[in-house]
Image: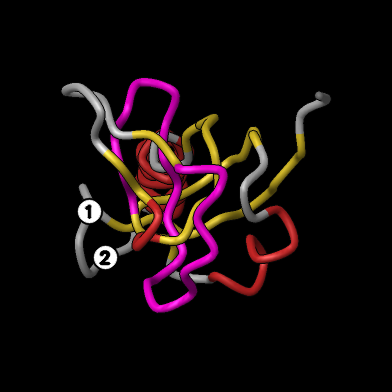
Amino acid sequence: MKQAIWLFLGVLCLAALPCAQAQSTKMSGTICNSACVVHPSHIATCDPQCTDTSGSVVLVGDKGHVMEISNPKMAMPHMGKHVTMTAVPTEKEREETIRIMELYEQGP
């Protein structure tokens, strides 16, 4: 009986491991204020001359997808710069909001 319980717990732990790892993803793009996001074509970009601070902090992905950042204090020092990050979608809005886990600024 004890062996069956330990076997069940082992299988349960192994099954939960891929689910936890699959949630974080690597992303790259530009940290931008949402008020400074422009759409000159069908792809969103960050206007480098914009100084508006009324919007929220977002990541404008390399392919033009805009995602709000739920922990903006981590991203504020990198405003207007191209970065690579490891992020996790938040529970609130899985497709539109991310939480930064690691953030690296890319060279010029």
Above or below: residue 43 compared with residue 45: above
Query: In the rendering, which numbered label is found on residue 21?
Result: none
100 on left or right of 37: right
14 on left or right of 89: right
Name the spot of residue 73 as percent of width and height, x first. 64, 74
Closer to the camera in the image, 15 or 62 = 62
Within the image, what quadrant is residue 105 found in? top right
Residue under pointer 2: 91
The answer to whether residue 54 is magenta is yes
- Which residue sits at x=45%, y=47%? 59
Q: Secondary structure under badge 1?
A: loop
Mark 1 and mark 2 residues within 8 Å of each other at the beta carbon: yes
The answer to whether residue 1 is magenta is no
Give the magenta-colored segment's residue range: 47-67
Residue under pointer 1: 94
Tally of marks: 2
* Magenta part, dominant SS: loop
Q: Look at label 1 and name its amino acid.
A: Arg
Q: Is residue 35 visible?
A: yes
Name the spot of residue 22 as percent of width and height, x first. 40, 34
